[in-house]
Image (tube, rainbow, N blue to C red):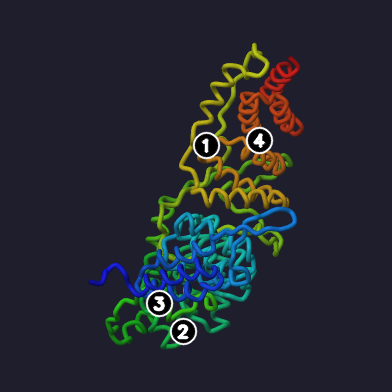
Amino acid sequence: MRNPAVTVASNKLAKAQEVAAAKGARQAVPLYIDACTALAAEQRFDAAAGALLDLLNLREKKRSLFGSKEINPLGPDRLNVAKHFAQATRTATASDPILELLGVLAAEYPDETQIRLANAEALYRAAYIADAIDEYRYCEQLLPNDGSLMARLGELYAMVSRNAEAVDSLRSGIARLLEQQRFDGFAAFCLKLVEVAPDSANDVHGWIESLGDDEFSAQRDDVTKLLDLVRERGADDGRWSDVEARLAELPAQAEHAELSPVEELAEHDAWHDSTLYEPASEDEMRMLLGPTPAAEEPVATSNGVAAEPQEAEYEEPPARMQGLQISTGRAKPTVAFDEPPRTARDFASETAASPAPTAPAAPSPQSAASAEARSAPAGAALPPGLAAYTRRKGDGLVTAGDYQGAAVCFERLLKAGFEPDVALPLLECYVQVGRLEEAAALAMQLADHQAAAGDLDKAVETLSRVLEHKQDLLIEQRRSELLAAAQG
């Protein structure tokens, strides 16, 4: 009797695995792609993405004059498999292994639009909104004329309350869509614009009225929501009555069977037409963000200029920082959005003056106690793959001189608990951007950890770095204690 669990797709995948074992992975690439197409047709989306993930993660040892190293055996076929994997992830769960591999592929192929868009979408679905914004900004460089990509970036700005940027991006994207006569998702983007800027209602009215009958009818649901929103916000001065009349004249909608994800993919090619990625609904945004946080006071820098709030993203790096602007679109989120820490005070408390230590390698009891208290984990750690990616991104931004952007990355890593090897570059970022209060608190904490580990010279160096830019009696006293202990 035939095993019902063994399907056509299962047999194809087994055949691909057999050929890979017998003849090598490159010989099995066409079979793997065929098997994954069959798995997707059976709506086994995670299995389809997982098979290609395993293929891309294969490693074999290659000998050379300088020893041996592990490489992926796919050779020039790796890019083709990576593109199929990127497409498969659109219907699969945005799991940690998928996020990690997409980040690796984005670094490996920085200008491949299919991969970068898939990376952005997966990060959005996993609710890493700030990283998704970074990745979409890079995609915007690859596709500068894509109106729906501009508008979608505006949607994400709105989700993190960057309303001025949201309005600019939405208006630019909508204008480009009108210019190109591309209307997929058009009314939905107009809806987002009115949500962020109700005074745009009159402009939006003109745009909606300019839609042809076919486009207007196809987007009737979003137009209806838009009309309701305009009136709810009190932005209708009477001109929207013609939109209401036009909706009333439309014939009744026929009921259509809901398309499966595979059928939807067959009807749209999002890798060449990014309009498949429609804006998130208001309910999705609320599920991600919850209540809008109160605005925070800006932090004063050393030159007296107010720094941007910590939640704000950093300035755009140079256009082709390959491998650095890899962070990681459009689908319902799979986990709750975890807001990054706002300030170093979340993981570094005030430190009291301490008596001189009696043993050379040990910090004072008060300092040790405060270090232990401050070392307590502040939240859940990032998934391993995303943590590694975030560290690489932070290091890359430091190398590129973008210290404010790097600080955001290192703060996310420290949210789960204090790690000296993360605190050290974060301290340098704080010093470079003039956030000296945070630098002072973090330096005290880092010096306590270094002293407890027996590295008094590094502890002294850490405190000295802050004293170069800020006079602080507590830091000076603590540095003197550690210096005396180091000199024995």
Could you say which quadrant of the image residue 432 lies in? top right
Tell me if residue 407 can be seen. yes
Q: Amino acid at mark 1?
A: Gly
Q: Nearer the viewer, mark 4 or mark 3?
A: 3
Question: Relative to residue 133, is residue 82 depicted above or below?
Answer: below
- Which SS class for mark 4? helix
User: Disc 4 to disc 1, how far (Cα)?
Assistant: 17 Å
- Which SS class for mark 1? loop
User: Disc 2 to disc 3, how far (Cα)?
Assistant: 24 Å
Residue at the location (63% across, 38% down)?
A: 421
User: Disc 3 to disc 1, how far (Cα)?
Assistant: 43 Å
Q: Give how far across and how far down residue 444 sits, in percent.
A: 63, 28
Q: Earlier in the sequence, mark 4 or mark 3?
A: 3
- Which SS class for mark 2? loop
Question: Relative to residue 374, is residue 256 depicted above or below?
Answer: below
Q: Earlier in the sequence, mark 4 or mark 2?
A: 2
Residue at the location (55% across, 68% down)?
A: 24
Q: Nearer the viewer, mark 4 or mark 2?
A: 4
In the image, taking residue 80 as reference, residue 38 lies left or right, namely left
Q: Quadrant of the N terminus?
A: bottom left
Tell me if residue 227 can be seen. no
Give the labeled residue for mark 4. 439
User: Disc 1 to disc 2, how far (Cα)?
Assistant: 53 Å
Which numbered tag is attached to residue 264? 3
Q: Give how far across and how far down residue 2 sits, in percent.
A: 25, 72
Question: Relative to residue 66, is residue 442 depicted above or below?
Answer: above
Neighbor class of circle 1 (other Cα within 10 Å; few <14, some 14-19, many 20+) is: some
Q: Quadrant of the C terminus?
A: top right
Q: Give how far across and how far down residue 90 sits, in percent.
A: 45, 68
